[in-house]
Amino acid sequence: MKKHYVYGTTLNSIAKVTRIIKFDLQAEPDTGKSQLKVGENIQSIFDLGPGNFGSEAVFVPNQPGTECEEDDGYLIFFVHDENTRKLAVNAIDTKTMFAELVAVAE
């Protein structure tokens, strides 16, 4: 079965994760870009915000063990706020990838 979506990250100049990106593997990539923007094969970009750096995200299906759409679930990842020195576990809905978090645990 051919995969439809993949999730990746962008790194800043000192190799810290700053954004999580949802790619559509069935769409044509937009070549020659100097910056990542939503469009073509980039479905969504979730920015961790200034002073926040994260881990690689892990996909968790909405209902494990059942047939569902490939992007029906959540991305779980750590975020470290370097301003407050707090660490949080975040979860975002993979269908929307909106900036509003589904859950945060500090």
Image (cartoon, helix red, strand yellow):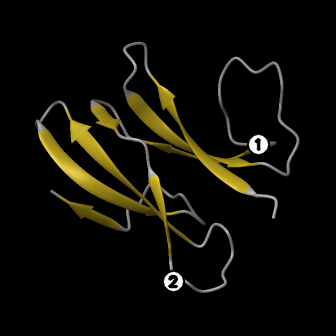
For the residues bearing labels 2 and 1, Cβ distance under 8 angstroms: no
* Residue 103 in picture, x, y percent from top left: 31, 67
Q: Quadrant of residue 79?
A: top left
Kindly identify the amino acid type of the residue bearing the numbered disc 2. Answer: Gln
**Residue farthest to the bottom, as pictured:** 66
Left or right of residue 4, residue 59 in this image: left
- Residue 97 or 54: which is nearer the viewer? 54
| Marks 2 and 1, the one that precedes in the sequence | 1
**Residue farthest to the left, as pictured:** 85
Q: Which mark is residue 93?
A: none
Kindly identify the amino acid type of the residue bearing the numbered disc 1. Answer: Gly
Residue tagged 2: 63
Residue tagged 1: 39
Left or right of residue 23, residue 63 in this image: left
The residue lying at 51 percent from left, 83 percent from top is 63
Q: Quadrant of residue 53?
A: top left
The residue lying at 65 percent from left, 30 percent from top is 36
In the structure shown, which secondary structural element does the residue marked by tag 2 occupy?
loop
Above-or-below relation of 8 to 95: above
Task: Name the mark nearer the viewer: 2 or 1.
Answer: 2
Q: How many marks?
A: 2
Above-or-below relation of 15 to 79: above
> Dot 1: within a 10 Å radius of its alpha carbon, few (fewer than 14), some, or many (20 or more) residues?
some
Q: Pick the quarter of the image with the N terminus.
A: bottom right
CA gap, disc 2 to disc 1?
29 Å
